[in-house]
Image (tube, grey):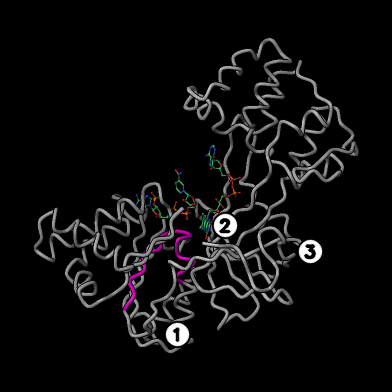
Amino acid sequence: MSTESASGYSRKNPFPATLTVNRKLTAEGSNKDTRHFEITLAGSGLAYEVGDSLGVFPCNDPVLVEQLLGRLGFSGDEVVPNADKVSVSVREALAKSYIITVPDKKLLGAIAAKDSSAEFLKNFLNPANKTNLDQYLWGRDVLDPLLEYTAAHFTPEEFVAHLRKLQPRLYSIASSRKVVGENVHLTVAVVRYTAYDRPRAGVASSFLAERADGEGTIPVFYHTAKHFRVPEDPATNMIMVGPGTGIAPFRAMLQERKASGASGKNWLFFGEQQAKSDFFYRDEFEGYQADGTLAKFTTAFSRDQAEKIYVQHRILENAAEFYDWLENGAIFYICGDAARMAKDVDTAMHQVVEKAGGKTPEQAAEYVDALKKDKRYRKDVY
Ligand SMILES: Cc1cc2nc3c(=O)[nH]c(=O)nc-3n(C[C@H](O)[C@H](O)[C@H](O)COP(=O)(O)OP(=O)(O)OC[C@H]3O[C@@H](n4cnc5c(N)ncnc54)[C@H](O)[C@@H]3O)c2cc1C
Ligand SMILES: NC(=O)c1ccc[n+]([C@@H]2O[C@H](COP(=O)([O-])OP(=O)(O)OC[C@H]3O[C@@H](n4cnc5c(N)ncnc54)[C@H](OP(=O)(O)O)[C@@H]3O)[C@@H](O)[C@H]2O)c1
């Protein structure tokens, strides 16, 4: 994988892109705030391919920046080095350059050194205590230990020396250039939660949702994913499994397959919580069913009934047909949650091969391994 581009723009030299559309995909009654974004890359020469991701350099929440400045007693105008060693105001450094949503253990050590009641934080400097450190960090940002240990005081320069560099986030591209030209579409779940009585939000997802208005506000680059392309032979069939925001690259692939007139059949599995509020891009996919771009479209709404129904349950219900598609050379694609969904779908794949292919668990494992070796099991999970 690489982040290079012939345009001259790259992760090291991101293009200042402009957000043109910010639309909620989730409707009233949803437990989520998942959005469709459109960003223009006009003038950038950035030529992404379907399957690639867009890298976004976010800014931190200005409210959190001001809370930090207030607690630290800084005016905000003091000059400090940013994470690239360029001199900027501490306000700008905290907004654009440093991580302020997760305290680094160096900062915890420095707070412990300055406030005797925070002595226990020193234990987290020992790598053997990583699990305890992770537990402590869950839900805490840089402001939390500072509010708790009020005897810890820093100069602006000293403070930023204990922070790490803010990193870009990747988002699967949800569009094909054949259809959207110099634009790029994303499907993003905005991370929001409350911890220690303060509402919090994911840095990049809330940046896109709330703070990315204005010309050239979003520094972007694209991240090539050569392993996650539409089939090289347009006659090859595709099975795509994309619950939640995992749908993004498959929207792009369907746009591409339709625009290029690919003759291979397409089968899409989509899952979300509730059909009435979380059926992303419903009209588009039903349109693809009607015009034949989608040969099959299978949904799993997990919370529309008492028992959970997930995409893997639908795969198992369709085991015979699913196995037939694999036997006929289909390429299997999966995108979305890596922690649980992708593992459970993998288990379902083995069960399909056992059940519909009449194989032992060992033979099914060999069959799935062979798919992977032949690049017919393509994953983009996070
Ligand atoms: C290749 C790739 C493609 C991706 N594609 C997409 C995509 O298409 N759409 C999409 O939405 N995302 C996608 N992601 C994920 C995306 O990159 C970000 O990780 C995601 O948007 C969260 O980033 P953030 O900056 O908003 O949140 P962050 O600031 O990174 O915060 C997230 C962190 O908040 C903490 N947290 C979350 N909930 C809680 C809670 N309840 N209590 C305490 N702490 C909590 C956790 O530590 C979590 O890791 C992709 C990732 C990769 C690697
Ligand atoms: N670390 C975590 O605990 C965690 C959890 C969820 C999502 N995430 C991340 O949050 C981001 C956004 O998530 P998202 O909104 O795109 O969707 P998502 O939370 O992955 O949910 C999409 C659908 O998948 C269902 N689902 C839950 N567990 C599943 C499993 N084991 N197998 C199959 N389907 C399952 C959900 O059902 P239900 O909600 O009804 O269970 C929902 O219907 C992603 O980055 C994802 O990786 C992280």
Q: How far separated are the C-alphas under marks 2 and 3?
A: 21 Å
Secondary-structure class at tag 1: helix
Residue 308 location in percent, x, y? 31, 51
Residue range of the region highlighted in magenta in the rendering: 237-250
Q: Which residue is mark 3?
A: 214
Which of the labelled discs sits on residue 247, or is there none? none
- Nearest the viewer among 107 and 86 is 86
Q: Between tags 2 and 3, which lies in front?
A: 2
- Tag 1 near tag 3, CB within 8 Å: no
Residue 300: image quadrant is bottom left
In the drawing, does residue 233 fall left or right of residue 29?
left
Q: Residue at x 30, y 56 (%)?
A: 345
Q: Give percent across and percent down for residue 309.
A: 30, 55
Q: Amino acid at mark 3?
A: Gly
The residue that disc 1 covers is 258
Q: Which residue is pictured at 64% across the width and 32% down the height?
A: 103
Residue 170: which numbered mark, if any? 2
Please give the name of the residue rendered at 74% of the width and 45% of the height, measured from the top-left corner. Answer: 97
